[in-house]
Amino acid sequence: MKSLFWKIFLWFWGAMIVIALALYGIVLTTRPDPLPAPWRETAEAVVSSYSRAAIREWNSGGQVGLSKYLQEIERRTRGHFWLYDAGGRELSGHPIPPRRPDLPLLPPPEFGKGLVETPRELQRLRQRAVGRRNAVFVLKRPRVLIAFEAQNAAGEKYQLIASLPEPRFGRLAADPRQQFWGGLAVLGLSALVCYGLVRYLTSPLIGLREATQKLASGDLSARTGAGAKKRRDEVADLGRDFDAMAERMEILLSSQRRLLGDVSHELRSPLTRLSMALALARRHASSGDEAEIEAAFERIGREKERLNDLIGQLLDLVRLESGEFSDAREILDLEKLVEEIAADADFEAREGEREVVIVRSDACRVVGSHELLRSAIENVVRNAVAYTPPQTIVEITLEAQREYSLLRVRDRGEGVPPESLTKLFEPFYRVAEARDRHSGGVGLGLAISARAVASHGGSIAAQNAAEGGLEIEIRLPLARSEPEA
């Protein structure tokens, strides 16, 4: 009974058996009237005819004639009859209870089986018939007692009482063997129905269990396949949720593996250059070439700074993804922050004959970390400056909408392929044609921006502008009240 399948199966099957027994009991206890009106009318007419004939036999032949007549109709009807006069005296001389089976002119021995008539009971039934125009019926299974009052030509009244077998209507009950095989067929059919129902209910769970075992063993492609089926219920929803979870885990683990590979590659390049610069410095130190030694040390310093920046950005990315940033949140003037970032970026961009321009700037106040938001926006702006061609401008637009502030940063570069737009915010991702590693970046700036914006309840997206270039949109919720301490 540890299996859910058999638990559900036995519960359903037991419930069906109980319902079948209950229905059978209801049928037994609510059967139709065993003495319906048509039968009563027919029986009353027959007993009325018997009573008039019995009175004639009594008046003409006395007790002997009456007894012979009653025994004749007893053979035909498998019943028993008594005739009483107005004083309550039984006229045929029949004993009560009925005569023994070994006496002549009696019905077969089984006739008297189950009879419970007594003289007192017959007298009470006779009294109920006195003065009535219709017969009196009393069902005493397996017999029916009928009392009817009639009179002769002289007006003398008599009561005829008949004890007849209980009538049966409709089909007779099947014999025990037929009932056994019929019950067995019902049990088999109900078991088959329950099996199909339980199989329908538990088959997704079995598939979910198999997929879970595969996932636990390291098969990240394990799926239940619930999404491809038309089934729509809670169990199917559970399978689809599991598939979504497994897909998300596969993406995260694949991203983690790719991130480790990218980090290893990114660290190897500056370390290789450091080793080369160090070897050159040693070589020139032995030759006494001061200029070459100074150049080698400058190269070592640049690579050291590059490594320091890379490690710092990696730490920031890890902290953002793990939610470990605990900087205090405050209400920030986003308009002022964007202006400061644009001024700094424009100052640096002028060396490359580029320009950063604020096209529109609405008053916007947001709740967040000054350090994180500055880093997020600055990375986007510096990325645009790096890829916009010389003699072009980077446009910045800040709009205040109903509940969000919308910041757009657009460059005049070549844009990116549509399939790469959603990948720009992945760590170390670069577009080979327009945004390769020769730009000097390591591919973490936009990833850090995406995590920082998400930590503030916002969103970031990239699209190719209609007039050319790449446009990145940052949405941040506007502040409504003072932040909680």
Image: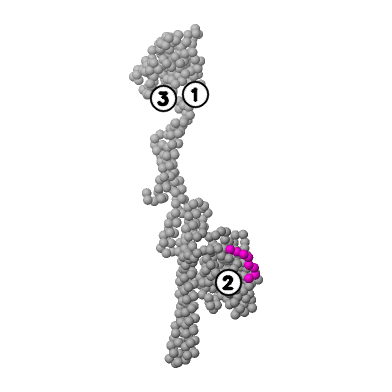
CB atoms at circles 1 and 2 under 8 Å apart? Answer: no
Camera sees residue 387: no
Q: In x, y percent, where is residue 408?
A: 61, 68
First of labels 1, 3 by sequence position: 1
**Measured Cα–Cα span from mark 2 to mark 3:** 105 Å
Query: In this view, which residue lies farthest toward the bottom?
Result: 287
Q: In x, y percent, where is residue 330?
A: 53, 63
Q: Which residue position holds label 2?
A: 341
CB atoms at circles 1 and 3 under 8 Å apart? Answer: no
Relative side of 365 to 179, left or right: right
Crowding at dot 3, Cα within 10 Å, few <14 / some 14-19 / many 20+, comes out as: few
Q: Which residue position holds label 3?
A: 141
Q: In x, y percent, where is residue 36?
A: 49, 25
Mark 2: secondary structure: helix
**Measured Cα–Cα span from mark 1 to mark 3:** 16 Å
Q: Which secondary structure dominates the residues rendered in magenta?
A: strand
Residue at 44%, 59% in the rendered image: 211
Residue at 43%, 20% in the rendered image: 145
Residue 39 numbered tag: 1
First of labels 1, 2 by sequence position: 1
Magenta segment = 358-365
Which amino acid does the dot numbered 3 rest on?
Arg
Mark 3: secondary structure: loop
